[in-house]
Image: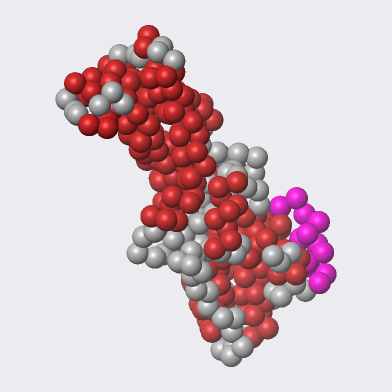
Amino acid sequence: MHVGKSYKFGEFLFWTRRKVYVLLVLSIVPVVLYETCGLEWISIPWTVVALLGTATAFTVGFKNTQTYNRTNEAQQVWTSIVSFSRSWGLFSRDFFSSPATTKELIYRHMAWLTALRYEMRSSRPWETVDKKHNTEYQRLFRVAERETPLEAELGKYISNEELQEVLAASSITARILSNQGKLLRICYDEQQMQIAQFLEMEKGLKEFYISQAKSEQLKNSPYPRQYAIVNRFFIRLFCLLLPFGLLKDFDQFNELVDGVMKGHMVWLVVPFSIMISWMYTSLEQIGESTENPFEGSANDVPLTKICRDIEIELRELLEEKDLPPKLYPQNNILL
């Protein structure tokens, strides 16, 4: 997540420059054919291009709205996890007289958070974080989940025996929550807690299961491919036809000017075509980078930061002093 005042224009231009190179070629070729080769018949009516541009603007706007909603929903899910985690920490401390039980419940919860964020950062075939323009930008920040193995992180919170058990499960996160439930039942059977307390903490586990399912649904369900391909097809078709639609109009400007530009006004199609097309391709790239809120890009929900803040708060409840450091933005990027 970008937490600075704004992206710098140079950063944005660097990120989208590869599209500009393609647009430059697409705009020069029609002008050369029209001006140098004398193929004036390749010009197409501007009305056709304008209608296509209008339809393209609708599809781009629709996609960007939906991808923003996906990111916003992901943020809401993890905000709920923060709230439920704080409640879990308080219940674990206040419902039990045994410090060892309290610590086990809290540490296992931190293990669940760790496993869930690693699951969210794992790659999917439709994600775009490994595209060339995104990998170049990643030099500005680090993705912690790609630097440290999950096993090493989980080992900080649970025993080695439980670690091997959860790693062998089909769903690590579900097995960790299941182990939490087992411990709660043991505590209830041993009369370490009352029925109302037991039900309250079981309700907390239910909320974690629900939040996990919502987060997994966003991770494992891509933006519908049929809408994505239509959006991309319309933009490419518009960018291809745009310079052909501008040829005749700019050529007519020769009657209005004198000097060095007279007879060469059609070459202005190149910069104007690039500028207009770049707006469309940039919006497409922005929507593409927003549709997957957990993939590890600069526009992600900051899972690592959220989990670290929860860990610090929960360990403070245990009155621990050796707390992990807070995470701060790198080049205004916070993950």
Q: Is residue 143 above or below residue 192?
A: above
User: Can you see residue 124?
Assistant: yes
Farthest top residue in view:
41
Q: 265 or 305, which lies in front? A: 265
Q: Which residues are magenta?
A: 160-171
Residue drawn 33% across and 21% down? 247
Query: For residue 44: magenta?
Result: no
Looking at the picture, how far across and down is residue 317, in whole percent? 53, 83
The kind of secondary structure the magenta stretch mainly shows is: helix
Residue drawn 71% across and 75% down? 156
**Image position of 233 (left or right of 150):** left
Q: Quadrant of residue 312?
A: bottom right
Farthest left residue in view:
256
Q: 147 or 154, which lies in front? A: 147
Query: For residue 169: magenta?
Result: yes
Looking at the picture, how far across and down is residue 116, in whole percent? 62, 59
Q: Give the colouring mode of the picture.
A: secondary structure
Q: Is residue 156 above or below residue 141?
A: below
Q: Quadrant of residue 141?
A: bottom right
Farthest front residue in view:
259
Q: Is residue 151 above or below residue 124?
A: below
Q: Is residue 216 above or below residue 314?
A: above
**Image position of 142 (left or right of 334):** right
Looking at the picture, how far across and down is residue 138, in whole percent? 57, 58
Looking at the picture, how far across and down is residue 326, in whole percent? 53, 78
Q: Quadrant of residue 124?
A: top right
Disc tally is 0
Residue drawn 55% across and 47% down? 133
User: Can you see residue 89?
Assistant: no
